[in-house]
Image (cartoon, rainbow, N blue to C red):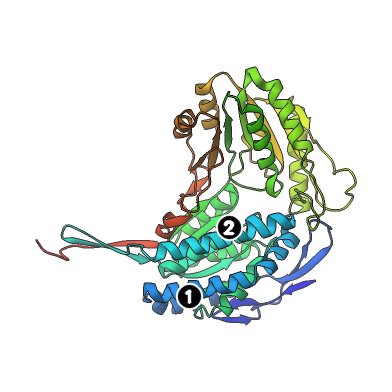
Amino acid sequence: MREYLKFYIDGKWVDPVESKIANTVNPATEAVSGTIALGTAADVDRAVKAARQAFTTWSKTSREERLQVLERILAEYQKRVGDLAAAVTEEMGAPKALASGYHVGLGLGHLTTAIAILKSFKFEEQKGGTLIVKEPIGVCGMITPWNWPINQVTVKVFPALATGCTIVLKPSQESHFSAHILAEIFDAARVPPGVFNLIQGKGSVVGAAMSTHPGIDMISITGSEAAGIEVAKNAAGTVKRVCQELGGKSANIVLDDADFAKNVAKGVAGMMVNSGQTCSATSRMLVPKSRMVEAIAAAKAAAASVTVGDPNGDAAMGPVVSKAQFNSIQEYIQKGIAEGATLVAGGPGRVEGLAKGFYVKPTVFANVSNDMVIAREEIFGPVQVIIGYDNVEHAVQLANDSDFGLAGNVAGVDVEKARAVARQIRAGWVSINDGFDFNAAFGGYKKSGNGREWGEFGFHEYLEIKSLLGYAPT
C-alpha cells in the first residue's frame, strides 16, 4: 500500500489545507493499492504563491544555471528508473517491459532533448534595428492524464524549467505514483523551492482552481476533448494562454504494395501497445477494398499473437486503467457489433482465464464505414477498426474526414509515394512507416487541440515574445 498524503509545495512536503483522501485501485487486481490526499482551491492558492515568488528569481537565472539543474535532475532520474517503472505498472497496468522501456524512456528522452536544445536555444535575435527577446511566460499550470504518466509530465515540465518558468502540476488522480517519484527526483536534484510544485486531486476541483487562478499565466493540459474545453472556458476569464493536447482518431493508410500484409499486422500490434490507451494511436486502419480479405487474415493473426495478462509477467498487454474505462470500451465494442461491422478478433467480455482485473480482449473490426460510431469517436482501448478505400485519393479523403487531427501514419514500400500521401493528411504528427523523433513537433489540428510540444517547439509554448524597437538604430 502506497500513501501519498502530502503535497510538494515550495520545496517541502506539506499537509493539505483540508484532510480529504481517496483510494486508488490497481487495475490488474482490482484491489486498493494506495491512498492519496485530494487538494482544494486553498492548496492551489498556496502553490501558486510559492511559484510566483520563485519566478522572480528563477526567471532571471542564466542558461548555465538552468542547465546545471537539469543535469542534476538527469542524474537523479537515472537512479530511480526502476522505481518509476514499477510505479507505472502498478498505477495504470503497463506491462513491466513497456513500463521500463517506453514509459521511462520517453521521460529520459524529453529530459536529454531539453538539455541539448537549451545549450543553443536563441532567447534573443536581432532583426534589423529591433531585438526580439523570448522571455519565460511565468507560472505554468499543468494538468496531465493517466495513460502515459511520465511522458505527459516530463514533456511539459522540462521545457518549462529550461525556459525559466515555474510550475504547478496536477497529475491524474488515477496515475499519481510516478508523479510523486518525479517530485522526489526534483527535490533530490535541489530544484529551487517553489520552482516545481505538485498537488493531486480532482480535475473538477484542483484543475478548475488552477485554470481560473489569476496568478497562473498559462495552462497546459493533456486530456479528453471535454476536459480541454472546460479548461479553456475557465481560463478565458483571466485571458491566460491555454495549450491543449486532446483526443485523436488517427488514420493509418496502408498502401497497396508487397509489404501489405506485414504492414497490416504491424499496425494491429501497434494499436494494442499500452492497451490502446494512446491519444495518437492509429485506431483507423485504411486498406484497399480489393485486399480487405487479406487484411482481415493478417489482422486476425496479429491480434491472436498479443498475449494479455499480469503486467508483472511476460504479457504484451495488461489491463486498461479502471473499471470505468473497461465499461466504456465494452460499450463501444457492442456498438460496433450493432452497427454491422465485421468482428475479426476479440469482442465483448472479459479475457478468458482472467476473472480479476480490467482486461480487454485485443479487438479488431473490419468492413467498417467511416460514419460508424467506432470510426468517429475515440475509444481509447485496444480496438482497431479497418476501413476500405477505393484509391489513394479516397484514402486521404477518409483520413481527413474526422473531427480530430492529432496523428497519422502512412505505411508502404515506395517512400516517395508515402511522402506524398503523408503531406495530404491534416494532422499534426504524421509518421512514414512509423517514424519517430523527439525533436518533432507534437500536437493536433481541429478538435485534437492547439499548440505544440516536444523538442524546440515545446520551448515556445512557455515563452512570451518581446520586441525592443530602436534597440540598434540605423
Q: Residue 69 bears which disc, if any?
A: 1
* Residue at x-position 58% and y-position 34%: 252
Q: Residue 310 in the image: state x and y as whole percent.
A: 82, 54
Q: Is residue 367 above or below residue 141?
A: above
Q: Residue 451 in the image: state x and y as whole percent.
A: 45, 51
Q: Is residue 31 above or below residue 6?
A: above
Q: Can residue 304 be seen?
A: yes
Residue that mark 2 sits on: 106
Q: Nearer the viewer, residue 446 or 101?
A: 101
Q: Residue 466 in the image: state x and y as whole percent.
A: 28, 63
Q: Nearer the viewer, residue 139 or 17?
A: 139
Apparent side of residue 113 relative to residue 276 in the rendered image (left or right): left
SS label for mark 2:
helix
Res 424 → quadrant: top left
Closer to the N terminus: mark 1 or mark 2?
A: 1
Q: Residues within 10 Å of mark 1 (few under 14, many from 20)?
A: some
Q: Residue 463 in the image: state x and y as whole percent.
A: 38, 62
- What amino acid is labelled 1 in the image? Val
Q: Can residue 139 be seen?
A: no
Q: Nearer the viewer, residue 415 or 120?
A: 415
- What amino acid is labelled 2 in the image? Leu
SS label for mark 1:
helix
- Assign the C terminus to one quadrant of the image: bottom left
